[in-house]
Image (cartoon, rainbow, N blue to C red):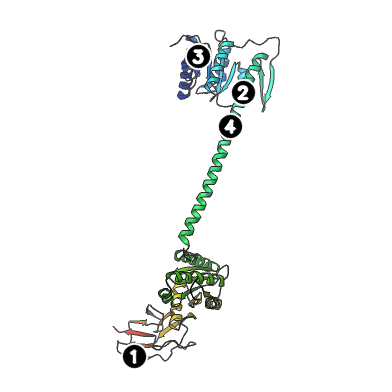
Amino acid sequence: MSDGPRVLIVEDSRTQAWQLSILLEDNGFRPEIAPDIARARELLRTRRFELVVTDLMLPDGVGFDLCRQIKSDAALRSVPVLILTSETDPANVLHGLEAGAEGYMTKGRENDVILARVREAISRGAADPPDKNLPPLEAGFLGDAFRISATREHLVRFLLASFEDVVHLDRLHLEDLRELEAKNRELTQAHADLAAANERLLALATTDGLTGLFNHRRLQDRLHEEARRSIRQGTPIGAIMVDIDKFKSLNDERGHAFGDEVLRNTARVIADALREIDVVGRYGGEEFGCLILEAAKDEVIEAGERLRAAVEAARVEVKGEEPVRVTVSVGCASFPDDTDNPNGLFAIADMALYAAKRSGRNRVEALARHRFEYRPPREEAPTSVTLCGDFNGWNRPTHPLALQPDGSWRVETVVPTGRLRYKYHLDGETWIPDPAAKIFEKDIYHEPISVVVIRRP
């Protein structure tokens, strides 16, 4: 160890104490460390130090207390004291002057500034005692009163050092602020880029790439959203299914590029034919699905006819090809007219669409609710009754009838708005016409479209 000036470092942070100790030792000083005021007083009684550098906040007091103890001890008052702190509170500066400290230094200063302050403090030694004939300077700050007995020279040096540290910290804060603003700009730009990327991903996930309409998944999501709103608000809602007639033939005859143009053109025409509040998407293949919001059943059917006519009036043109007239078949469904569950509207509209295609295409069809009821003779006493047949479209469904308290069997379902004809089928052998068959507007089928099968025990 060198024979340089001995410096007592009073600091409870091991890291900061060792950092300062290494800096001083590397520059010819002999530092020693005390973690608190008690240990510092022990060392001061046994060793001679040329300088005490004390932290402001210590486990057993504050640095001002240690400074007062040193300045009140005749054997120690000649040892200069530097108050070391991470704060630049003006009240602390006044407290330091009041306690008799020779200097005030904020943590985090550059090494050359720390060394310069240490050398200056050792070189100047303890401040001259104040003139006893002069009254102490009284100062107030934020309600606190201070009595400062420092000489003018001591006062000026102390305040200049404090001011220099404040300016330095302000400069650092300004640099930090500028860096923070730059980081914020980068973060804002990154957030904007991320939002744009998310929008692109959302568009890819919810948009049909060929037509630009919603895809099947997003269309179903919108159906569920609007279904909840319709139930909550008690407003009607309709669904329309649209299928391009004989699209496969167009693809086979003109090629897939022409077929793609037919899909794009039809999508544009359908979207333009609907209201702004309505929703349209590509359901799959050559089928499109539409949600007609806040519309009764007759308004849904009118919307279906409007878009059917718009598609028929348009012409698909591709360079080098003859213009082609395209038609569509349309199926309509409405809540609450056709179902008690609006989430199933597309399924019902699809059944109506199938009826439109079976009826000759380029037309609009809707379904109607119908109650099937069978009152068996008392002697039959069936255990179950099932309705089956092609009355509901392509899937030839079966519907079990429920036994009623009056002994009849009933089921309610949707059927095409044509002449409804069905028979009862007893024991798998006997066919009996239903005398109560409901007659609708038109007869679109050539065969009985449903039967009721009665199974005995």
Q: Relative to 371, is 103 above or below?
A: above
Between 51 and 123, the residue placed more toward the observer is: 123
Q: Earlier in the sequence, mark 2 or mark 1?
A: 2
Residue located beneath label 2 in the image:
164
Residue 23, compared with residue 346, is above or below; it is above
Q: Name the image quarter holding the N terminus.
A: top left
User: Label 3 crowding class (10 Å Cα cut-off): few <14, some 14-19, many 20+?
Assistant: many
Query: Which label sits in the foreground, 3 or 4?
Result: 4
Q: Is residue 16 left or right of residue 399?
A: right
Amino acid type, callout 3 = Val
Q: Nearer the viewer, mark 3 or mark 2?
A: 2
**Is label 4 in contact with label 2 (beta carbons under 8 Å)?**
no
Q: Amino acid at mark 1?
A: Trp
Q: Which mark is residue 7?
A: 3
Among the two numbered marks 3 and 4 on one chain, the one whose residue lies closer to the N terminus:
3
Report the quarter where the C terminus lies: bottom left
Marks 1 and 4 sit apart, C-alpha to C-alpha, by 96 Å
Q: Give the numbered dot on residue 431.
A: 1
Considering only order in the chain, which callout, 2 or 3, is on the residue closer to the N terminus?
Answer: 3
Cα–Cα span, label 2 and label 1? 110 Å
Q: What residue is pinned by disc 4?
A: 173
Q: Distance between the Cα atoms at labels 4 and 2? A: 14 Å
**Residue 272 shows in this picture:** yes
Instruction: Select label 3 or label 1 by which is in front.
Output: 3
